[in-house]
Image: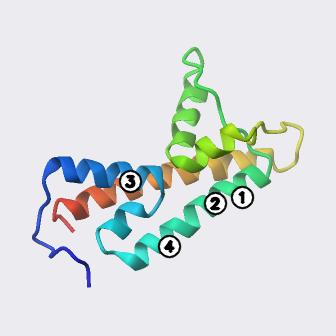
Amino acid sequence: MPIAAADETRSLPTTYLICAAAWALPGAGHLWLGRRQKGLIFLIALPLMFACGLWLEGRLFPFELTQPLVALAAFADVGVGVPYFVAAATGRGGGRAVAATFEYGNAFLIVAGLLNMLVVLDAFDVAQGRK
């Protein structure tokens, strides 16, 4: 049973901390809220999806505002939180455009970030007592 009752709401600063934790480490927000099963699934599935994207030689897109689609892909990549920064700091995610799996890798990286953004929104709703 979750720690918080369905009708309990948290203060806005606490909710924002939960959302920040949920963004930084996929599943952390749900774990904080006592939703262990969902939290563990997100904690395993989203970083694994991100790692598969790197393994498939996908690219971590740069923030180039002159190219709006590249900037949007970069924003989506960052959505996965800490795994993005770890990959960027260790030199992963350079991508290899001639690899047969390049586009699949890009899709995995982008979708992992976008899914984590949805997980953050779900944690926000749970923290506000909407779910």
Mark with earlier residue (3, 1): 3
State the mark number for residue 41: 4
Q: Position of residue 58 (x, y in %)?
A: 74, 44
Seen at 72% across and 39% down, the residue is: 59
Seen at 77% across and 36% down, the residue is: 94
Residue 8 position (above or below residue 88): below
**In terms of secondary structure, where does tag 4 sit?**
helix
Q: Where is mark 3, residue-wise? A: 21
Q: In the image shown, does 60 or 11 lie closer to the viewer?
A: 11
Crowding near the residue tagged with mark 3, few <14, some 14–19, many ≥20 C-alpha atoms within 10 Å: many
What separation in Å lies between label 1 and label 2 (alpha carbons)? Answer: 5 Å
Mark with earlier residue (4, 1): 4
Q: Where is mark 2, residue-wise? A: 49
State the mark number for residue 106: none
Residue 18 position (above or below residue 126): above
Quadrant of the rendered structure where residue 2 is?
bottom left
What separation in Å lies between label 2 and label 4 (alpha carbons)? Answer: 12 Å
The residue type indicated by label 3 comes to Ala
